[in-house]
Image (tube, rainbow, N blue to C red):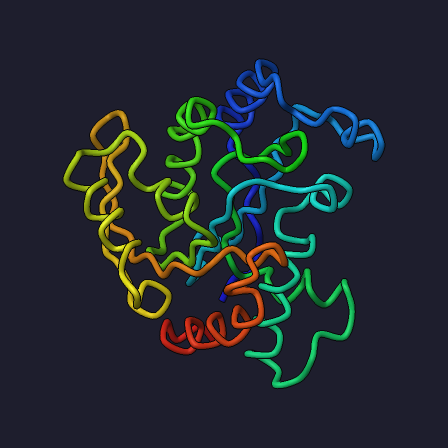
Amino acid sequence: MNHQAQSLPAGIDKAMRREAAELDRLDGDVYRQFDRDPLAPIVSLGPKNARLAVFGRDPGKKEVEVGLPFVGAGGQKVREALYRHRHGQPLPDFEASLTVGDDLFWINTVPYKPVGNKAWSMAVKRRFQPLVAALLTRQWDGDRVITLGREAFLWFGIGQSREVRDALEAFWSREDRFTATHVTQLTLDDGETKRFVLAPLPHPSPLNQRWFKRFPELLAQRLADLKIE
């Protein structure tokens, strides 16, 4: 497999920066703390032929510091489980957590850190949805997506038909939502469509007390079921 990550397409980078300039809850203090460009989207587009995408909500403080998504506390839970799945032993260090995921496609609903890590509004998610959807559809050939948390899963209904949205909501209400998969279709503004197989998981946050301790085993089972090696 080619593990070469892709650069963000110039047109999408420009559009994201334009949208970011209008965000009133962008955490400018954290970007200044680490001398990071607050308009630069935090994305990590893996190889176009990546077998799996990991889809989350938005970056946190550690992601701003490093300039990569899924490297903070929650992201480390994902990367740690991936490392253990692939190597049969605990994650040795931070650098290993980065390289273990270099063949996956990592992306968030909005690639900017909000103040207080409180979720972006639906209006903001709607503004970024066409850009993120274009990345998932045109920059990635795969179709299997592990979504982290309710907001990441239901993002696939933004701008879609009532039928698609209702099906997503119905699936999320199921008791087996963290073991079953849901097939959905994403339609872009120009009518282009792509089918995705969603494998939702709870958000890997310590605040999510009901599921936090079970997250590693749930993710391990997802990786096994999706045949990610």
Hey, which quadrant is residue 176 in on the image? bottom left
Question: What x and y, as percent, mark residue 166?
Answer: 19, 43
Relative placement, left or right, of 135 versus 209 is left
The residue sitting at 35% across, 43% down in the picture is: 154
The residue sitting at 52% across, 30% down in the picture is: 120
Hey, which quadrant is residue 119 in on the image? top right
Check the image and report above or below for 12 versus 74.
above
Residue reaching furthest top?
Answer: 22
Question: What x and y, as percent, mark residue 76?
Answer: 66, 61
Name the foreground residue: 23 vs 211: 211
The residue sitting at 27% across, 25% down in the picture is: 189
The residue sitting at 62% across, 52% down in the picture is: 70
Hey, which quadrant is residue 226 in on the image? bottom left
Residue reaching furthest left?
Answer: 163
Check the image and report above or below for 220 versus 26.
below
Check the image and report above or below for 32 versus 83.
above
Residue reaching furthest bottom?
Answer: 88
Question: What x and y, as percent, mark residue 123?
Answer: 43, 22
